[in-house]
Image (cartoon, rainbow, N blue to C red):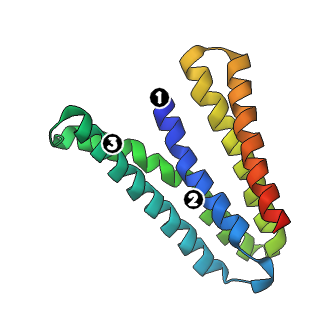
Amino acid sequence: MAPRIASILYGVIAIITVDLAVDPADRPHYGETALYVLLVGIAMTMTLIFVKLVAKEAEVGAHLSIRTSGEIVRDASLVMAFPMLTAVEIVAAAMATARWPTLLDLILYEGFAAVFLIGFLSSYILERNIKLGLQRGGTWLVLLLALVAVKKLT
C-alpha cells in the first residue's frame, strides 16, 4: 500500500514543478493548460512504469510476466491522480472565470497538502506510528518549501 501512495507523489511533484514555471502574466489558455497538465501526468506515469519494469527485471534477471507488468502499470496509474484533479480544477476555474494567480496558488497549496499527506501516510502505513508519519510529512513539506523559496528568489 505504501508504494501505491508514494506513486501519487510523482504526479504531485511534476505538477508543482510546472506550476512554479508558469508565469501568470502570460495568461495561458485554460483548455490548453488542462491538456498540458494531463500530458505531464502521462509522461510521469510512463517514466515510473519504465523505471519500475527495468528495475524489477534487473532484480529477477528475466523479463516480467504480463501479470507482473500489469501490476506495475496499475500501481503507476496512481501518478495521474493529482494531474487529473488539477486539470478538472483548471476547467472549473475557466468556467468560474478565476484569475491565473489565484488558480496557481490554489494548485501550489494543494500540492503542499498532498506532499505532506503522502509523506505521512507512506510512513504511517509501515510503522503505525503517528510521530514518525508527522516527521516524514513535515520533512518532505520543508524540502518542498525550500524548492519554492529558491524559485521565488530567482
Residue at the image position 42 percent from the left and 49 percent from the top: 77
Query: Can you give x and y, in whole percent of width and height, for residue 113 in the image?
Result: 74, 44
As displayed, is residue 69 above or below residue 128? below
Q: Is residue 98 visible?
A: no
Q: Which residue is mark 3?
A: 72
Per the image, the residue denoted by label 2 is: 83
Q: Earlier in the sequence, mark 3 or mark 2?
A: 3
Callout 2 amino acid: Pro
First along the sequence among labels 1 and 2 = 1
Give the number of marks.
3
Q: Is residue 71 visible?
A: yes
- Disc 3 marks a residue whose amino acid type is Ile
* Mark-to-mark CA distance, 1 and 2: 20 Å
- Residue kind at label 1, given as amino acid type: Met
Q: Quadrant of residue 108?
A: bottom right
Q: Residue at x 69, y 20 (%)?
A: 132
Instruction: Tell me if label 3 and label 2 are in contact, CB under 8 Å.
Output: no
Position in image of residue 93 (x %, y %): 74, 70
Query: To which quarter of the image does residue 37 belong?
Result: bottom right
Instruction: Determine whether the residue tagged by mark 1 lies in a helix, strand or loop.
Output: loop
* Labels 1 and 2 touching (C-beta < 8 A): no
Above-or-below relation of 132 to 146: above
Q: Residue at point 47% right, 58% down?
A: 44
| Residue 77 horizontal side relative to residue 109, left or right | left
Residue 54's spot in the image, x, y percent?
A: 28, 46
Instruction: Residue under label 1, please give it.
Output: 1
* x and y, in percent, of residue 85 in the image: 61, 57
Task: Using the numbered discs, state the Cα–Cα distance from disc 3 to disc 2 in whole angstroms.
Answer: 19 Å
The secondary structure type at the circle numbered 3 is: helix
Query: As drawn, is 52 to the left or to the right of 41?
Result: left
